[in-house]
Image (spheres, rainbow, N blue to C red):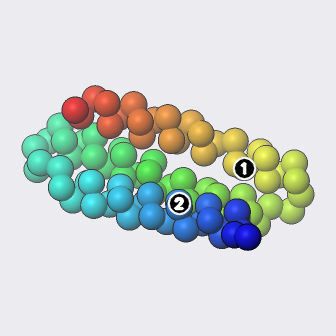
Amino acid sequence: MTNPNLDLRIRTKEFALRIIRLFQALPKTGEAQVLGKQVLRSGTSIGTQYREARRAKSGRNFISKNGRRPARARRNRNLAGITR
């Protein structure tokens, strides 16, 4: 049986690496770079926020800290739709 916490840590790290590769592949135009930097910031912060939430002192604190992740993921999805 796999550890779901380990699985999520691995998935968020792989997601961040994919975001970095996406940013590197974007055209060097001003518009692409502005949007790309936003995607880079929000996409790489998801794993960081998850790791921070894992260090929460209580279950309530964990839920509070983890509540920000879905909004970041939606922002990435929305920005990806703009660039297509």
Residue 52 is at least partly visible in this image? no
Q: Secondary structure at mark 1?
A: helix
**Residue indicated by mark 2:** 12
Marks 1/2: CA distance? Answer: 15 Å
Tell me where residue 29 appears, x and y as whole percent.
Answer: 10, 44
Q: Residue at x 89, y 57 (%)?
A: 58
Disc on res. 19: none
Q: Which residue is mark 1?
A: 65
Left or right side of 49 for 56: right
Q: Is residue 15 visible?
A: yes
State the count of labels: 2
Q: Position of residue 14 (x, y in %)?
A: 45, 64
**Viewer-closest of 27 and 11:** 11
Quadrant in which the N terminus appears: bottom right
Is 6 rendered above or below residue 81?
below
**Residue drawn at 49 percent across, 35 percent down:** 74
Name of the residue lying farthest toward the front:
1
In the drawing, does residue 17 fall left or right of residue 22? right
Quarter of the figure that contains the C terminus? top left
Q: Please name the residue shown 49% across and 65% down the image.
A: 13
> Quadrant of the rendered structure where residue 69 is?
top right
Residue type marked 1: Lys
| Residue 31 on image: x %, y % | 17, 37
- Say what secondary structure mark 2 lies in: helix
**Three-letter code, disc 2:** Thr
The residue depicted at 72 percent of the width and 58 percent of the height is 53
User: Neighbour class for label 1 at 10 Å: few (<14), some, many (≥20)?
Assistant: some
Considering only vertical position in the picture, is 26 above or below 67?
below
Answer few, some or many: residues within 10 Å of disc 2's Cα (few below 14, many 20 plus, some between 14 and 19).
Answer: many
